[in-house]
Image: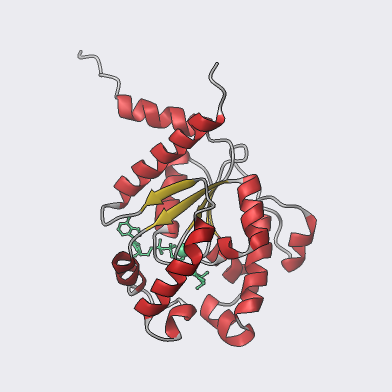
Amino acid sequence: MEHEQPNPELAAQADIIARIDRPIVLVGMMGVGKTSVGKRLAALLNAPFLDADDEIEKAARMSIPDIFATYGEAFFRDGERRVIARLLGEPAPALKELSLPPVSPAKGDVRVISTGGGAFINEETRALILRRGIAVWLDADLDTLVERTARKDNRPLLKQGNPREILANLKTTRAPFYAQAPIHVISGNTPHAKTLAKLLSAVGAWLDTQEPIA
Ligand SMILES: Nc1ncnc2c1ncn2[C@@H]1O[C@H](COP(=O)(O)OP(=O)(O)OP(=O)(O)O)[C@@H](O)[C@H]1O
Ligand SMILES: O=C(O)C1=C[C@@H](O)[C@@H](O)[C@H](O)C1
Ligand SMILES: [Mg+2]
């Protein structure tokens, strides 16, 4: 019987996965792929996946467009801040938001949290994410964002005018905030698997800078 050759790429991935000890939090523009890439990353890490937008909808028992339409953006942002605090395991006042219990991680503290596009712009939310998680800025060019966001009709901010112009403005004004994430990955026009591999190796490179060399 032939011996199987060890696969160095898989071994490198396993090494990175074993060193991840905190939540990975994906931040970036709407449509960049935080949810779809985040789900795949969680599967690879064998860790829970939590989508902040979904959690807000569950907590409010309303869709995001309905929350915006009924209560306005400021109300949504406040809920978003409290929900993300809960997903990051922040105790007490966050629980006021609803009767949901804090999420209990299955494997240590590791989980993948995909945030909504505006979450990292809030100072308090950003500070919490930077303190408790490994923040990854997923980024893409404007054409890619326009194409990807056009696939679904569930983003109220894009209904306030020309989606391309709105995305261009948001991208410019938000970039300095997203850039505060320690890791930056381009979610380009390639299959999800490629973005995932790039993301994991960027996390590995960042972990290398955090650990003292023995
Ligand atoms: N790397 C990729 N390659 C191809 N398609 C992608 C990639 N990343 C995301 N997409 C597609 O783009 C669309 C938007 O992705 P997704 O919903 O994950 O974005 P998001 O960042 O979570 O957006 P939002 O902030 O509005 O929740 C989906 O149809 C998804 O399949
Ligand atoms: O970029 C944003 O501000 C938003 C992105 C979505 O994920 C949702 O959180 C909501 O539609 C707002
Ligand atoms: Mg999403």
Give the image location of residue 110, x and y in percent.
57, 41
Which image quadrant is residue 81 in? bottom right
Determine whether 166 is above or below 137 in the image: below
Q: How is the image coloured?
A: secondary structure
Tell how many labels: 0
In depth, the one of 3 and 147 nearer the eye is 147
Q: Is residue 160 left or right of residue 3?
A: right
Q: Is residue 87 visible?
A: no
Which image quarter is the N terminus in?
A: top left
Which residue is at 39% across, 37% downward? 201
Quarter that holds the C terminus: top right
The extreme left residue here reads 2
Residue 32, x across and y down, in percent: 39, 61
Q: Residue at x 61, y 86 (%)?
A: 70
Residue 127 spot, x, y in % from top left: 65, 54
Image position of 95 (left or right of 15): right
Left or right relative to 140: residue 128: right
**Which of the pair 150/100 is nearer the observer?**
150
Q: Residue at x 43, y 46 (%)?
A: 41
Report which quarter residue 158 is drawn in: bottom left
Q: Does residue 53 sit above or below 155 in this rendering?
A: above
Residue 61: % across, % down:
61, 74
| Residue at image coords 50%, 57% | 178
Q: Is residue 24 visible?
A: yes
Quadrant housing residue 36: bottom left
